[in-house]
Amino acid sequence: MTMSPHEVQAYVLTYLEALDCQIMERSPAHVTVKLSPEADKALTNRPYYWGFVERTGAPAETMSFTFIFDPDSYQQAIEAAEAKAAQASPPAVPNPDGVTNGSPQGEPPKETILGRYFGITPSLPQLGPGRILREEVVYGSRRLQQIFGAAREGGAFVNLFEQAAKRQLRATAPAVYEPWLGVCFKVEFACDLKREELHFLGISLRSGEIIEKFGTKLNRRDLSPRLAENMHVQTAKVSLFDAGAALESHLTNRLLELDYSWAEKAQERLDLELDVLDTYYEAVLREDMPEVELPGNITSDTENVPSNRTPPVPLIKVVDITNAKPIGADVELAAEAAVPIDSETDAEEEKAKQAVIDREAMKLQYETRRTEMIWQYEPKVKVTAISSGMFHLR
């Protein structure tokens, strides 16, 4: 799923207009806007500033942004405007010292404090509340995701009233509102592919009538969060809990009527991928590896470890030998001869231990890959209520 620059711009402008932001400049590629207090709190992440404003009662100064929806077109427009301005501006005039300044002919350069001491200085960037920040808002950008989240949080639940005609305001008897519960469900059909649908359902809290495509019923009406004059709201006969359960049951019945051949094909692809995965790891794990008992919880499947070293020669007791030399030197030589054999044994044991560790790591990798593949290919249907509201209609 993706959005074109035009769709992104339409969505962002709808959000900004809903929050009463001031549009200062607008083109097909960008919009310059001064945020309203509500939009500033949602998008600029300045809790300390707004806490100060609310505690002291100081006048709030919101931030301004230039949101760019088509960077290439916007850059071309900027370059064309700069070229046009360069052609219309008079040429620069050199001063008596031979230094060229950017002031028009006959107009002296403006004096600044820094210029008085250091000469000509470049202009500094504009800081403070008057500056306009520039951001690219394209599909997938961080700012657009933030706007999605702010719209989802602010519009998760609404309470709207249909506005009455002018003649109703002068009528003697008040008009009667019928309460409706509207819920927008997002249905995701997911496997290694994905498809999404939106179902906007409405149920009358007086009669229990359920209407599909409830949004078309609301588009033809003028809705406002303010209760109009000379209007009366009827008491609901169906509780919100029962109404929500009825909408869920209605949507479930509709989903059961759909064609799920895509799920069968996805299951076949999953079985094929799992067979390939099992065949590969079965061959890898079947390889002969020496194993020994390891400290802790890791134990080997076999008890004997093959060894190629020869057993030491048994010592022969020397008796009835006269003038025999002390045997201390011979013992030391035997101990030195045994050192290489012990080192070789330790190396083999370490090799066997490492083989066991590698096999356990391979088993863990196999289980992880299998879990990921099931998550990716297994067909599933997910239903989420993304927004809801109470609508009082005539």
Image: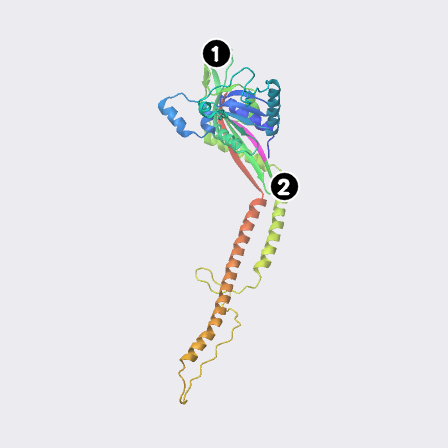
View extreme (left): residue? 56
Tell me the element at label 2: helix
Q: Nearer the viewer, residue 1 or 167?
A: 1
Vertical order, 191 against 337 (above or below): above
Q: Nearer the viewer, residue 276 or 316?
A: 316
**Mainly helix, strand or loop, the magenta region?**
strand
Q: How far across and down, in percent of the image, does residue 141 sit?
A: 54, 33
Q: Residue 197 in magenta?
A: yes
Numbered-mark total: 2
Which is nearer the N-term, disc 1 or disc 2? Answer: 1
Vertical order, 262 against 350 (above or below): above
Q: How far across and down, in percent of the image, does residue 347 sit?
A: 50, 66
Q: How far across and down, in percent of the image, does residue 11 sit?
A: 55, 27
Q: Is residue 206 visible?
A: no
Q: Residue at x 48, y 71 (%)?
A: 340
Q: What are the residue bounds of the magenta stretch?
A: 196-203
Residue placed under numbered mark 2 in the picture: 262
Mark 2 crowdedness (10 Å alpha carbons): few <14, some 14-19, many ≥20: some
Q: Residue at x 52, y 58 (%)?
A: 358
Q: Nearer the viewer, residue 87 or 150?
A: 87
Mark 1 crowdedness (10 Å alpha carbons): few <14, some 14-19, many ≥20: some
Q: Residue 194 in magenta?
A: no
Residue placed under numbered mark 1 in the picture: 169
What numbered label is drawn on residue 152? none
Residue type at numbered disc 1: Leu
Q: CA separation, marks 1 and 2?
A: 55 Å
Relative horizontal placement of residue 356, taking residue 85 as reference (left or right) = left
Residue type at numbered disc 2: Trp
Q: How far across and down, in percent of the image, does residue 91 sit?
A: 59, 19
Vertical order, 344 against 92 (above or below): below
